[in-house]
Image (cartoon, coloured by chain):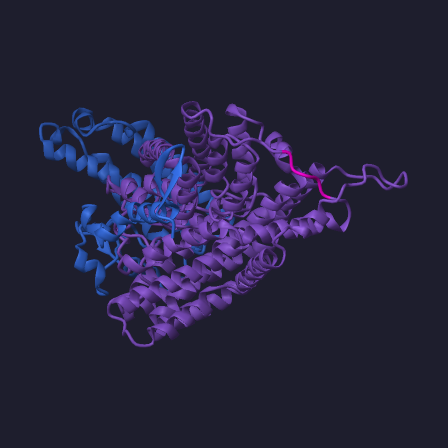
Amino acid sequence: MTLSVQRNGIQWPGPTVSMTCLAIVLLFPCVGCGNFSKQSGSETSESDANEHDEHLEHLIPAHKPQTFEALVQQLSIRLPTLQGAGGKDNEAQGEGANEHSRILTEYHEIIDWIPELAADSNLKKKDWETATAIGREIGSIWAKHFGGVTAAQLNTSPGETNRTAAEQIEPLIRRLEELVPESRNPEQRRESPEDQQNSSGDSSVSETDNTL
Amino acid sequence: MAQMMFWGFVLRFIQCLAQAAPFILTGFVVGAILRRFFGHVETKRLFGGTGLRSLFRAWVIGMLLPVCSLGVVPVIRELRKAGLAGGTILAFAMSAPLFNPLSLLYGLTLSEPAAILSFAACSLVIVTVVGYVWDRMFPNSAEETLQLRGVAYGIRRVLAIAVAAAREASSSSLGYIAAGLAGVALLGAVLPNASLQHAFNFDNAMAPAWMTLIAIPVYATPMLAMSQLGMMFQHANSIGAAFVLLILGAGMNMGLAIWIFREYGFRRTLVWFALLLSVVLGLAYILDKPLFPKDIEPANHTHAFDVYCQPFSPGDPVTGLASRTLEKLDRDINPYEWQSVKLLGLLILSGIVLRIADRRGRLEAWIEAEPVTAGTTRLDIVVPPHILGLISLLGLVILSIAGCYAYYPPAEEVLDQMYIAKGEALSGALGGDVNHTKYWIEVYDDWSRKLEVGVYLRKWHLSDYHRWKARLLREQLELLEHEVEDNEKAEVQKLVSVISRTHQRLRYAFTEELAH
């Protein structure tokens, strides 16, 4: 084993020593840390990560509809809320602005879920493309009226903006509703319309997040 | 504990060796082609000598050749002998393992193909900036270029490649490769099982920095790095950390680090790493937010790095670790990988035999017999060796592109494989068999990506509709994996039914709706 070598008059560590040192330097941080999650500031503790009952989570927002049909319903149901929010009654209240901001954010997120939930339905390619094109149209209307607007600005802006946006969005939702029958599963189609309304669930907005 | 560490080391070492074997073999062949067909002078010309042009050429050649960070070792050793500047060699060493045609195509199926293209562009920035600055700081890093003796024409040319590859396979290249494998295997021995699942979450500002710490000993093939990026995108983990993983995880390993240290000394190595890590980390933090996927709900974990941790969990029984290691190896290693390991073993053995039996290099002397300068007839043209070398390298690139069509079969074939994987994964889930389910979910997930690439390769287009169908399936499989791990029977049953329906829709989309 060569522990040192002479090169250019300088005594250098030999290959064995060099390799060992480099290996130690490079591996030291890994050997010493055990679990990175603790040091990284993650919520999970070291012992948690080592145990098998640990919960690995995918956060699903509470306002995320479960089906395409529920999504269209949500767009329709929330439209009057969108129209009314941020009106003169709320102008002086900070809470009103926050609430309006939340309504707008959730509405925008629901628009963004159109491609995913349309794909997770029985819609065929042509109908899926129609649904996503409508989604893009709604998205551009939303961006035109509310894009880049802060909560404070929303609070002071008149409800007129919201009404104009809602009027433009409404016919597009009607077009999405036309696609709903095609989006249903065969077993859903066999159910009565009342049953469908009951089973689509998700019409109420909960404050808590569902986690899987 | 010590037993688990030992078997964890053994398992990870052999798994990585099997994954690396095809790329290592390619590396030995490329090194032999450079030595025997190009020679040192022509190799230097191929890489454009010195300066920015040579750095760019090194990046382009590296991107085209199908080698990994272990397979690149014999090639850079040859480039060093050819007298190339250190910056150019290191630029090649870093860029060659990052992408190849197979992995680039795979990358395009990730949720954000733009991110992969940005990563590729950034890798050019890294090798150019770091290589250029390093060359300016250490202008005399190149060795003297020596003129090698030519090779006689005919069968001796072919034999020359085999002999050069075998000699190199039994040289210190083997030591560097073993060191690279030992580095990643050591991680598998010392990092607790699943301990990296929460280290790279999107909201962890330190994620790119932590990734830098583990990415140097990590060894990942281009395909593995790409699939890990896929998992990180799927979970909306830190994009900066994903970038560091690609550049350092795929581009660097312990063997390569040791080679740089031995060739260029402590100071130059330190400067190289300081420059490299500064640029990589800087870019990682710049890319982190702009490339973050906007349409994915972030998860609080990733499975991408489970392969770098202890394969056995603390709750597992200590007895029978050897047999479980064998079981895992048998299950995880593909037949073509075993074949490559055997071929690599044969090459190393041949090299050792040559070294023992032919110490004076008589075989090489016979191979290097004075070549005939002209053909005997008009049609018997003597092709210059460097042209043959260029054709060989181009052939390798063409072969790897053609290999894409075999690796990513047509949709019908993939769907048949997916049907089998679905059956295994879902029945395992219903039966509560966690290991079986996890294994087949991985296979199922992988086939869903191959389905997308296979269609894209044949039609040069894949609609968003089809991408969504495959992505939904993967997301549902991920949820199923967690439910099976948590033993949530009701949720598992529900998800099994959901996945079956999603699979049916995907099948319909990829068979009936492709032409439209």
Rendering coords of residue A49 (x, y %) = 22, 58
The reply, left or right, for residue B483 in relation to residue B220 is left
Q: Is residue B97 above or below residue B318?
A: above
Q: Check residue B365 for magenta coloring.
A: no
Nearest the camera: B422 or B317? B317
Q: How many marks?
A: 0
Name the residue: 49% across, 49% down.
B172
- Which quadrant of the figure has residue B35? top right
Q: Is residue A45 above or below residue A102?
A: below
Which color was chain A given?
blue
Rendering coords of residue A30 (x, y %) = 27, 50
The quadrant of the image that shows the C terminus of chain A is bottom left
Asked if residue B515 can be seen in this view, the reply is: no
Q: Is residue B487 above or below residue A139?
A: below
Nearest the camera: A109 or B240? B240
The reply, left or right, for residue B353 in relation to residue B213 is right
Name the residue: 45% across, 39% down.
B94
Tell me which segment is drawn in magenta.
Answer: B147-151
Q: Main secondary structure of the magenta part?
A: loop
Which color was chain B given?
purple
Nearest the camera: B392 or B102? B392
